[in-house]
Amino acid sequence: MTEEWLTHDARVDEEHARLRETLRALRAVVLHCREPALLAEATDVVRARLKVHFHDEEVAAETDPEAAEILREDHRALLRMVDRLRMLTAASHAERKVAMAELFAALEKHEREVDVPVFRLLKPTAA
């Protein structure tokens, strides 16, 4: 992981790496699988993985409840995008591809503009 994506909180950085791995697998399924049931299952796995990932809200709440609420709001928006992608499992490949690209863009923006800055800010005050 490049420096720009590191929060310098080992727990959070490790979790981000696991999440990226799961998302790469989702991308492969969305791009190459034509079976709606498998596509739905893949999005369910990603949704579950994101919920585990969102444990970082608790890490933030340890030192800054306001930061934790910012994370919660952004996380809810990301989950809605995953839910939308799941609803498109029977839709055209092009529609799924667009929804997946939007999800990936939103996740990158979330890490760049929310997760990384929040955890870098909190790191000096963390116990």
Image (tube, grey):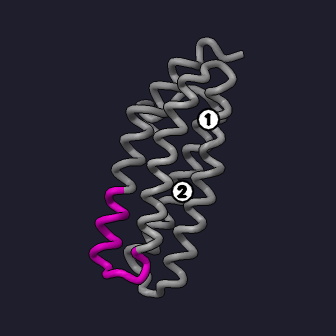
Dot 2: element: helix
The residue wearing badge 2 is 21
Q: Is residue 33 magenta?
A: no
* Above or below, 121 relative to 56: above
Looking at the image, the residue that sits furthest to the top is 125
Provide residue 75's location: percent of width, then percent of height: 51, 44
Which label was assigned to residue 57?
1
* Above or below, 85 relative to 81: below
Provide residue 110's location: percent of width, then percent of height: 42, 40
Mark 2: amino acid: Glu
- Viewer-proximal residue, 79 or 27? 79
Front label number (2 vs 1): 1
Mark positioned earlier in the residue sequence (2 or 1): 2
Q: Is residue 41 left or right of residue 24?
A: right
Magenta stretch: dominant secondary structure: helix
* Above or below, 40 relative to 85: below
Q: Is residue 87 left or right of residue 105?
A: right
